Amino acid sequence: MRRSVRMLTVVTGVLLCGMGAVVHAEGTDGGTRAAVTKRVKATVPAVTEVVSGPEVRNFQAFCDEWMQKLRDRESYNSSHIAWEARAGHVSGEYVGYEAHCTCIAREEPGKDPIGKITYRETRYKREGTTETDALAEPSTVLEQSDVTEIFRYGKGRWQY
């Protein structure tokens, strides 16, 4: 005599961009209950044409976070200058970042999305008779360079 197996499946997770859901299934087999939990991989719809711009995979939000990290780094750099004392003067250098940037991402069918952030990095020098005087004076620009950073989208997030 064969017993029939009845399966009830309940989705207990939510499918969001790049995230998986947990599917919980409870079955009954002649009065015996068994619980099975399985990970279901969420699929992001495949791109059928080239998409370009800051809206690709929410690259603009990632770009804004990245630029905030650079502002934080500049603040740290300017408050931790390695001062050198010479002939009654002190001087020190630090690196800063221009607030203006360009954020662009591109996604092609069958390829990982790529994002680029371009900004200007500036090396500054401060000089004065004391550290306090040097900080009160405007910084002198020693060098400027344009920086392009390239990021890849993988595993549900922008990678760096």
Image (spheres, rainbow, N blue to C red):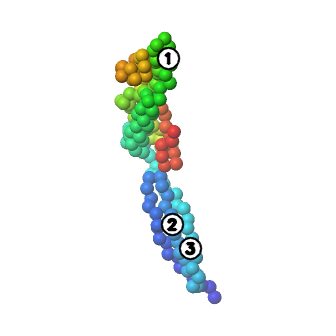
Crowd class of label 2 (few under 14; some 14 to 19; many from 20; radius 10 Å)? some
Q: Which residue is mark 1?
A: 85
Q: Which residue is mark 2?
A: 23
Is 126 in front, or is 56?
126
Residue 34 appears in view: yes
Q: Which residue is mark 3?
A: 35
In the image, residue 139 lies at what x, y percent? 39, 20
C-alpha span from label 3 to label 2: 11 Å
The quadrant of the picture occupied by the N terminus is: bottom right
Against 49, is 34 above or below? below
Dots 3, 2 in contact, CB < 8 A: no
In the image, residue 101 lies at what x, y percent? 38, 31
The disc at residue 39 is none
Give, as a three-letter code, the residue at label 3. Answer: Ala
In the image, residue 112 lies at what x, y percent? 50, 42
Residue 56 appears in view: no
